[in-house]
Each structure stands twice: as C-alpha cells, then as structure tokens.
Amino acid sequence: MDGMAPDSVTIRKMLQPLRPRGPDDEGVWQQGPLQFGHRRLSILDLSERGHQPMVDSELAFTIVFNGTIYNFRELREELKGLGYHFTSTGDTEVILKSFHAWGQACVERFAGMFAFALWDQRAKQLHLVRDRMGIKPLYWTQDGKRLLFASTLPALLAAGGVDTQFDPLALHHHFSLHAVVPAPRTLFREVHKMEPAHWKTIHADGLTEQHRYWSLTAQRPVEAKSEWEWAEAVRESLMQAVERRRAASDVPVGVLLSGGLDSSLLVGMLAEAGHRDIRTFSIGFEDSPEERGSEFEYSDAVVERFQTRHQKIIIPNDQALPRLTEAVDAMSEPMFGQDAIGFYLLAEQVSQEVSVVLSGQGADEVFAGYFWYPLMEGATGSPVDRFRQFYFDRDHPEMMELLAEPYQGEDHTAVLMQELLERAGADEYLDQVLRADTTTLVVDDPVKRVDNMTMAWGLEARVPFLDHQLVELAAQIPPALKLKHQGKGPLKLISRGLLPDSVIDRPKGYFPMPALKYVRGEFLEFMQDILCSQACRERGLYQRSYIDKLLANPTAENSFTRIQGSKLWQLTLTEYWLQRHMSSC
C-alpha cells in the first residue's frame, strides 16, 4: 500500500503454513509493489502448464486461485468460440480469459467453489473474490503500509506485525454460535474474512470497492408444485451437482461415508449414474458409557448395498488426544465441533488413497435436518427469540459471566441474528432461519471445518449439497415439505428404494467423539492444564469464576449447550488455539 516492493522473506513465511494445503508445487511472482505466492494441490492439468501464480502476458493478468470451477470445460469452449486460445487444460486459465471477456460479471457464470486474487497489470487493480457459499476461504488484513491476504488466518499471522487485538463483537458471536464468527469478522479486530458472494477491488491508490454478486431468496414460485414434483426437481439438481464434482478432476474421487442419509445418498447417486469401483471411507471412535463412538452399522449397510471399495478407520481415545494438537494447528480459526479431529484423522488416511472426496455437509441446513428447526417453527415470540432459545450456546447474561470486563458489551449476537432473519426476500419464518443458516452460519460450521481438516492433508473436499443451483431450488420449497418425515423430506423421498430403509429411517446422527463431550480422565486433565495455565490467566479473556464452575462439574446439565456441545471444551479449544497460533505474532 506504500508503493514499496515487498520483501521475499515475508511471502516465504506466509507460504510455509500453507504447505499442507498445497503439497505438490510452490510459486512466487512479483511485479512492483505486488507479490503473489501459491501452494498447489494438483487436481486439474497436472502438468507444469497448471503452475501458479499463472501469468497471461497477452492479457496482462496474473492469478492465484484456490478451488475448482466445475463447469470450466463448457466455459472454455464458449471462450474458444469468442477467439480465445488456451495453453493449459485446467480451470485457472479459464478464470483469466473469462474476466477479460465478461469483466466482473464472469463470476456469475462460474459453478464451483473458489477464492482467487487477480492482478490487472494495465488497470493496476487487485481483485479479491470468494464463491457464493463461502466454501473456499480468503482472509485479509490491512494497515497503512500493506495489504496481506491468504487462504488461512495463520498464514497472515506468519507474516508478522499483524494486529491481534480481540474484537468483542466477534467473541460474543464465537461463544454464542458455537465458534461461528460470520464474515467479515474474525476474533481479531484487524483481521477479516472475505464475505461469501463478494467481489473486492483494490486500486493502486488504496481506494477499495466491494459488491455482492449473488444473494439467496427463499420465496415460493408463482407456479405451485406437488411434493413429488419438488422431490424430482431436487433429484435432478443433486445428480447434476454430484456429477459435476466427480467429473471435474484428473485424479480419482472418493466419498466420506458417515453412515448418515446425506453421504449415503451421494454414494447412491454415483451408483445410479453407472459409476463402479466407488471408493468410500468411514471413521469411528471409542464408545463412552453415554454414547456410541461410531455409526458403522449404517455405513456398512451402504457399503454392502453398493459394493463400494471401503476403508473403515477406528481411533481409540489413547490415540486421539495426542493427535489433537495437530488438528488444532490445522484450524484457521478455533472450531468447537467435536468431529474436527475426526475429519482430520480421517483425511490423513483418505489422502493416501485419493486427492478429492465428496462430502455431505450442508444438507441439514439446506433441507431442515436438525432437531431445532421444528422447535423454532413451533415457538412463539420475536424471530430472534424463537431462534435463540434453541440455538444459542449462551444467552447474554451468561456471556457476561464468561468474558472478562474488557470484552463485555451489548447482546451483539441477538442484533446480528435479528438483521439476518429480518432481511427481505423470505416468505415464512423457517425460510428466514434456513437462509441465515445456509448463507452465513454454515460457512464457519461445518464448511470451514471440513475444508481445514481435509486440506491439512492435501485432500480437497467437495460438497454437492451446497451447489448454488441446488440451494436456490431448495430455498423455494415450502418449509413444511422439508420438515416432513422428521426432516429433509425431499431427500428422504428420493432415497426410498435407492438406499437401505435403515439409513433413511434412522434418527439424525452426528459425527461422534464422545470423549470431547462427556469429559473425564486424561481429557479432563488436558482441559484443566490449558485453562489453568499461566498463558490463559495472563490473557485475561475469561472470568476465573466461570472456568472454576465448569471444571467443578464438567458433565452437569448446565455444562452442555442447547445443541449438546461441551462448554468446557469450547473454552479449552479457544485458549489452546490461541496458544498454538499466536506464538508467532
């Protein structure tokens, strides 16, 4: 931002934390005050022609790109018809030519997950862009001298000199919405996330422009459809989403099979489309007295039905805790989901077999699969009150018990959710809730979690249920039809006869790791050590009385959140993440 050429040491420091996300290649490119660095995971055009940063000397564009444009082949043919020629066979060059052909409107033609930075040499403009659903991450920070951006927050911190003062609003969201801090905020006041479906342009003089290029409405179409007509439309759209994500790869594609309806349906769709030798992967943990640690009985039924080439991974507790540090190191931001370490350990094994997997994330938010949706629908009161009583981890008074005085303030999360719920373009209350969940909350939980934990092993996870065309279709479906059949009504209709009935009719499951929920033994000792450490005390983020209350009885009823998360684990994970990642600041 000061016009000075950046030093090569900083970019190398930033690239180091990104090495696991891109294990196959590294590139650095510089022009004047701008410098790009890239770590590559080779999935399309495995040759040197796919190297990044990719420079188009003729068009005077340079790009660094993370993600996949699933319809890149169709776009390339269209661009060839307009006279463009290509030197590579992947999707990165398609973005460059598309921007030249159609300007910023090019992104409206992209079907995929993407975050990219594009430098226009002639106009002296830097463009930062993130996909509609926020599947691929993009962080940035700016001071008077420089603008830094990266795929992970730790990569920004590695540059040094980043302001890491806490943002009280973000802390309130973090501990109310089970680690969700909606973009553009992060826990740090001066570090930001690019908002999904946004395009930001930074001019040479520092002037910045930003606009939203896509938004979701949740309203009924003029022409009504029957339940079965909706289900058939969903089947066709989901099949297209699955096939696009399978086909856009020059390497084999597998499926993360949890045993739930969503991932099982992806396997069924692949089989229905005629694909054989389907690779599937499942993981389970040690049981606790309160809860089973695996769902193998359901995934096994799917494997038997479709004769997939299956790998089952079982993790005992004495192996899980020593690996926890690695999973925390792989997190761009603190994540409370007890399945984070599960995805991390699963991805380690899967990455030895394939580089791309399909995953079922997003289906519950898009098709109303969680238990709290019907509870919200049947509640009374203001929109935000109906939401909070079944979703917030802590109400505002408890937040004031948790956070130390410098970080206390207003009920920021209620204000946020009121704004999200009351935006125009939603017909019914549950339309408001599902739209807020799908476009905002799901981005940080679970989409970010799956991206971080898989990419930690150079494994790209693709999420067909968050295909933007499928999401747009689902948003038009009456909420009552989504709530039918104990939730995800349209998905259950199209699954009947394709999947085993035991999978369709099973209660909603979660990726279990009981030891992080029912805290005892060495896991409790670990949490005590973190929360009673000198670093935690000196940080002064929490009130000690609140910590002491949770440590005294970590399995008491009031030690769990409304969606059955461990409050003690939430505090521990946040502090441990800060200890692991802020040491480099």
Image: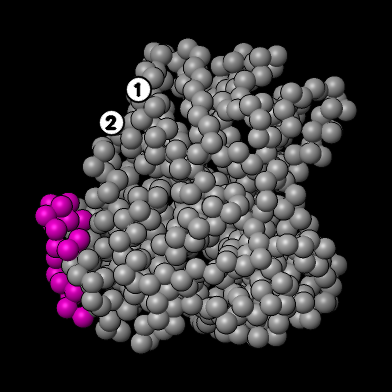
Query: Which x, y percent locates residue 361?
Result: 58, 63
Q: Magenta residues?
A: 529-553
Question: Is residue 557 at least partly visible in the picture?
Answer: yes
Residue 203 or residue 140, whichever sits in front? 140
Looking at marks 1 and 2 on the same chain, the residue that comes earlier in the sequence is marked by: 1
Which residue is label 1 attached to?
9
Q: Amino acid at mark 1?
A: Val
Magenta region's main secondary structure?
helix
Q: Is residue 207 magenta?
A: no
Identify the residue at image location x=49%, y=43%.
Answer: 21
Query: Which x, y percent locates residue 210?
Result: 55, 35
**Quadrant into which the C terminus falls:** top left
Which residue is label 2 attached to?
161
Q: What SS does tag 2 mark?
A: loop
Question: Is residue 410 at least partly visible in the picture?
Answer: no
Q: Quadrant of residue 54?
A: top right
Query: Which x, y percent locates residue 14?
Result: 39, 32
Mark drawn on residue 396 = none
Q: Amino acid at mark 2?
A: Gly
